[in-house]
Image (cartoon, coloured by chain):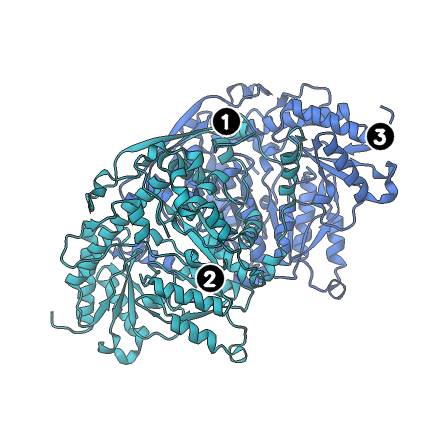
Chain colours: A blue, B cyan
Amino acid sequence: MVPPPHKAETELVDPSDSSPVAIKPVVSQSQTESKPMALDLSHHLSIESKIRQKSLLKVSSSYLARDPELLSLAAGLPSPSLFPIEKITASVAIAKHESARDGLWKNDGLLPGMRRDLHKEKDSSLKGHSEYDLSGALQYEQGTGAKQLLKFLKRHTEIVHNPPYRDWDCIMTGGNTHAMETVFRMLINPGDYIVLEEFAFPETVEGLKPLRARMIGIDMDAEGMRSDSLELVLETWDEDARGGKRPGVLYVVPTGQNPTGATMSMQRRKEIYNTCVKYDLVIIEDDPYYFLQMSDYIPGQDTGAVQVPQTNDQFLASLLPSMLSIDTQGRVLRLDSFSKVAAPGLRCGWITGSDRFVERVLRHNEVGLQFPSGASMAVLHSMLTEAWGQDGYLDWLVNLRAEYTSRRNTLVSAMDKFLPREVCDWVVPSAGMFVWLRVHYAKHPHKDNGVEAVEKELFEAGIDNKVLILPGAWFKVKPETSDVFFRATFASVSANDMAVAIERFGEVLRKGFALQT
Amino acid sequence: MVPPPHKAETELVDPSDSSPVAIKPVVSQSQTESKPMALDLSHHLSIESKIRQKSLLKVSSSYLARDPELLSLAAGLPSPSLFPIEKITASVAIAKHESARDGLWKNDGLLPGMRRDLHKEKDSSLKGHSEYDLSGALQYEQGTGAKQLLKFLKRHTEIVHNPPYRDWDCIMTGGNTHAMETVFRMLINPGDYIVLEEFAFPETVEGLKPLRARMIGIDMDAEGMRSDSLELVLETWDEDARGGKRPGVLYVVPTGQNPTGATMSMQRRKEIYNTCVKYDLVIIEDDPYYFLQMSDYIPGQDTGAVQVPQTNDQFLASLLPSMLSIDTQGRVLRLDSFSKVAAPGLRCGWITGSDRFVERVLRHNEVGLQFPSGASMAVLHSMLTEAWGQDGYLDWLVNLRAEYTSRRNTLVSAMDKFLPREVCDWVVPSAGMFVWLRVHYAKHPHKDNGVEAVEKELFEAGIDNKVLILPGAWFKVKPETSDVFFRATFASVSANDMAVAIERFGEVLRKGFALQT
């Protein structure tokens, strides 16, 4: 992946033609032409998804597109002149932290304080939303999401991931939980098996159960899902014993996995991808923490002192490649979200995949979500295209990951200080929002009660000692568990509270394991 | 239904306790206690819906609620201090048209021009969102939607519909298309039959097909779905002949139906409801046009001169009762939306029903939509509770329906003027956004080609004559059709364009039927 040249003056970017300077090094015309076309993987579509048809009402707009003189009594759109919202204004942070690019970012507890006011006013005209005005944002929208914002996101995806096949596309979603439901329904019939990590986000599991998907949890190590375990499960799949065919879908959170915090190395990503090629699995790459990849933790160093890349080229080069970026066949459906990099309340994200799959999502959107909130899209569009531009957005992400890195350092340094290493261990996460604490249950006085009982006892002792830290059982996909685990987050807790909370949990462990303090 | 007393000074309303004056006449404590409890209709739940479980991560918040001293490393919420949006401001129209309450509203082509600026700023505090601030709007939210806005909507529902059973509740949705998908999935297993009107909104049909619901279209007349036809279908249901059990769900748009513009009388509503009680059907009341009920059309009168109620009491008394308002058993799921009364781009609405059903919707929201956009909810919350209040919102609706009434008058008066009555007829709609034009195909020279061919010929002749008006076939649920139909909308077309478009379609009919002009 060749990163685009850094542009120092983001204010000069023409929002209608984002980062034209950057486009050539990333994907030249000849590069695009030399890319292969995606495979036809439509045999993976669920019965439900195959049935979906193009919306008739969307067809009617094609007549209008063909003949601008046509007077329409067709679409039942309410009149924008009757929308009661006259203006929406958003003030956004400036993207670039001026002090950040001296090579060492210093956490001063504040994001850049300068603000830029962005105005969107309702246009009285009903036609020609060449720019994304408020009457457009408040009106019915295409199932793809607003094309002006989608254009920015496609360009962003091209800059960061440069999918190595030709016919890829993006479509907007209501965030990754909505996107998950959409792609699960697109690919899974009741009774089908799906492969995921042995520990997973509870809402993923809770979303799959009503679809009657049968879940196979694959062993994990410090790099997340183990490719050898995946290979073994697929290779030795016995349809009769399992009562169903080999899984056709793999769900994975490759970066800063929730709950384990694990990040897959480049080698691991390639192994998992190749195994999915070998056994014909579609890969759902749920990757909301992608840009929260962090610099190394150095024990004893000031937790607020974080190495930052000097340029956006260096930033992009420092990121691990996504599954999408190594997908030459169009078998990855990548889920991106603004929830971790802007604000979850906006309920906005996007799916990238082969246009065959993206078209099926569009058909679903048309009879469900329809499109993300226009208020959310208008705010994002203003921020991303008018205030920041492509390079400015990368600047923002650089700052953001420095903030989370500092928080990670704070939590891990508290763990170093307060947790008894003789009964627990952890891998310092290199991305995301979580640390996964392994507790050696075999050393626990009540080990005869079993893993779950010891975990529950420690969890409840935590509550009694005024600290809430989530037990591994809540995240379990595989029925059997080898050890006791806890998930701790550093996302939104103050440095002081983190230290106190960890100190309290240290007390719980010492007491539970009857250690000398 | 006893309407609340009108409060002249909406600005004095305390938003945290909306319209306290109005609460007593509508639902007194003793009235609530005398209401019955909803029936347990959980046998109607689909397999998918029955499986849904409470989200584990939501459980963790119950620990925090119990012990405020608990330090949490649990929920992976991003830090609001890292949200890049510092402020959102909305300017909204004032709700009340000062000139409107002299009894005759005069269309001056403009909504009230005064505006009120509403500010929402991010609160640095992470705790205690007693009011709905921007950090709350940008953060993860409960699956019910923001409780502050939900409170307003429940009170509004109580004032307007006063559901006659005790354990009803509301939950927010992403608008009625999203709500439809949600309740369909909650109530329908693949292969199940569902009853709806013989003509329906295409997206309803397109949403039901992938769920493999089998649709029965019930005959309609000027008052919408015919109760005798419904009774006949249910009474004579033959499981063997139909290959499935009697429908357990009825979907209906009782007010300003799309596409026919039909509105059910009070008598018809009661008949349909009683039939659903008799045969144990759940009723999905999709009612986005409820407040666009109109005063009578008087041929020859100035189209902009619209009778308006003098008070909100009179306004509420003038509205037909909803199916919800006559539902003593909790068998109605009512879908309300802001799309037709505020702005569709906000993608926000709500479902009202028995709390058993509402809880199932919540479980689905948690693993799908999650909640409507916080940007949308914040704008709506400001407008509804801070600027308008309950009475102000009713003022707004009075103005809005006057606007749409004037538009309806314009379209119908053009039809009076330009369409050849010898080959077509129509019922003047008393609600909604649509007029349904019946064309007497039996008089058409090419009638031997069949209904659909004649309809298609006229549709295409319309395109050639620069007018787009949608053919009945696009809305058909029943395979057989008795006549040729077209749907015309008056929602967002200028008065001049409406007249020209109808004149053009008049030419199409005259030419097609070879009439003397």
Identify the residue position indicated by label 3 in the image: A422
Q: Nearer the viewer, residue A232 or A369?
A: A369
Q: Nearer the viewer, residue A99 or A344?
A: A344
B164 with respect to B458 (left or right): right
Q: Check disc 2 and report the residue beneath it.
A: B283
Where residue A278 sits, quadrant-wise, is bottom right
Q: Measuring from the top left, give residue A137's x and y in whole percent.
A: 38, 42
B62 relative to B180, above or below: above
Horizontally, is B157 left or right of A469 in the view? left
Kindly indicate the quadrant of the structure image that contains residue B7: top left
Three-letter code, disc 3: Glu
- Residue A378 shows up from this direction: no
Badges 2 and 1: C-beta atoms under 8 Å apart? Answer: no
- Marks 2 and 3 close (CB-CB < 8 Å): no
- Chain bearing mark 1: B
Report the residue that reaches farthest toward the left.
B517
Task: Give the labeled residue for mark 1.
Answer: B123
- Separation of residues labelled 1 and 3 (CA atoms): 42 Å
At which x and y percent is residue B17? 44, 36
Cα–Cα gap, marks 2 and 1: 43 Å
**SS under mark 2:** strand
* Front disc: 1 or 3: 1
